[in-house]
Amino acid sequence: MSTQLFSYERLFDFTRKVFESMGCPEEQATSATQVLLSADLRGVDSHGVARLSGYVRLWEAKRVNATPDIKVIHETPSTAVVDGDSGLGLVVAPVAMDIAIQKAKEVGTGWVSVQNSNHYGIAAAHAMKALEHDMIGISMTNASPLVAPTFSTAKMLGTNPICVAAPAGSQPPFVMDMATTTAANGKLEILQRKNQEAPLGWVQDAEGNPTTDANILKKGGALLPLGGDREHGSHKGYALGAMVDIFSALLSGANYAPWVPPFPAYVPMPARQPGKGIGHFFGAMRIDAFRSVEEYKRDMDDWISGFRNARTLPGHEKVLIPGDPEREMEELRKKEGIPLLDAVVTDLKQLAERFDLSLSTA
């Protein structure tokens, strides 16, 4: 499938206008656009403007509140629970992360769990907000139940990503952003658009058998936890996904396990709703709450350099640090533009027609 190049500036302007057309206030529309397009810039194409029409459909189904009253419903000096009032997760999450950062400024660390939200884009967009404050940022969220725990055929968990962003000195920051599944559902969706098969270990069919069918979720199949099967450590991926669910939902009062609301608006909501909306969890840790920033950054640079200079396998130039590929992709795409699959462009053109907007690549 072919692609078309779009400049970041043009996509940003178009996306912001779509959110404003939904009724989002200008500041929130801008915040949502920044989060969404950070995925496209970083090469996480499954979570960028490819999902824009999905957010619009959620709004049309009245599952997203375009003007949420986001508020703290419980707090201590270092913790808070935030109610997102069914707002876009792209809007709710930055507010919650800012609260975590502010608490870290005041008492050393800040921890915020969120209820009553929606899909929040890529985890890194939120965790990385802490970097400019000389803090370590943590971001995680539960998600639609698409994942079968080890030894099961039932879809009980989401892809439940975790991101940890740690600042460095002269070296770029360490940014680990990963799903707790072998592959995120978005990567499966990309394979579907390209009419390609999935690698073994990504999914299983309705009976629990390994399969390469990228459309298997529509036939009762499930994504697999990180590791793929028990022999390759899927019980560890299952445990990580469960941990995210506990931090994001059991601490906040959001829905959990198979009762998390689905992202596709056409999928019926679960009959049981033990909590409110989707849940997130954020953390901010001030470096100087542990040691001096200067000493930490010196040692962090040394740590990163050690890995970069480690002996490599034949055919590999260097050992990568988590965040390297995304950072390099962001630099490239800011210069050369963002490539979008034809199917995504078609979706955007339909949105342009829906809201009487123009879409151009220049």
Image (cartoon, rainbow, N blue to C red):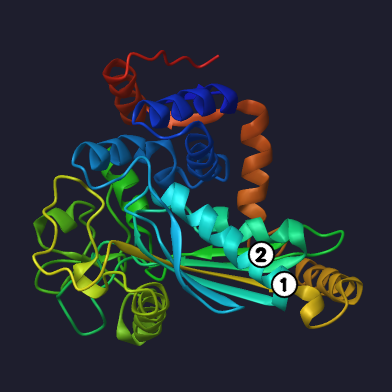
x, y (%) of residue 87?
Answer: 36, 49
List the residue tagged with mark 2. 102
Question: Which mark identifies residue 106?
Answer: 1
Q: Quadrant of residue 49?
A: top left
Q: Residues within 10 Å of mark 2 (few under 14, many from 20)?
A: some
In front: 304, or 353?
A: 353
Specify whether residue 313 is in view. Answer: no
Is residue 62 toward the left or the right of residue 225 in the image? left
Say what secondary structure mark 1 lies in: helix
Is residue 326 toward the left or the right of residue 57 in the image? right
Quarter of the image with the C terminus in it: top right
In front: 310, or 7?
A: 7
x, y (%) of residue 307?
Answer: 75, 71
Is residue 277 toward the left or the right of residue 273 in the image? right
Q: Are the residues flagged by discs 2 and 1 in contact, CB closer than 8 Å?
A: yes
x, y (%) of residue 309?
Answer: 81, 68
Specify whether residue 277 is in view. Answer: yes
Residue at (33% x, 31% y) in the render: 22
269 versus 305 height, above or below: above
Quarter of the image with the N terminus in it: top left
x, y (%) of residue 172?
Answer: 76, 57
Q: Number of labelled discs? A: 2
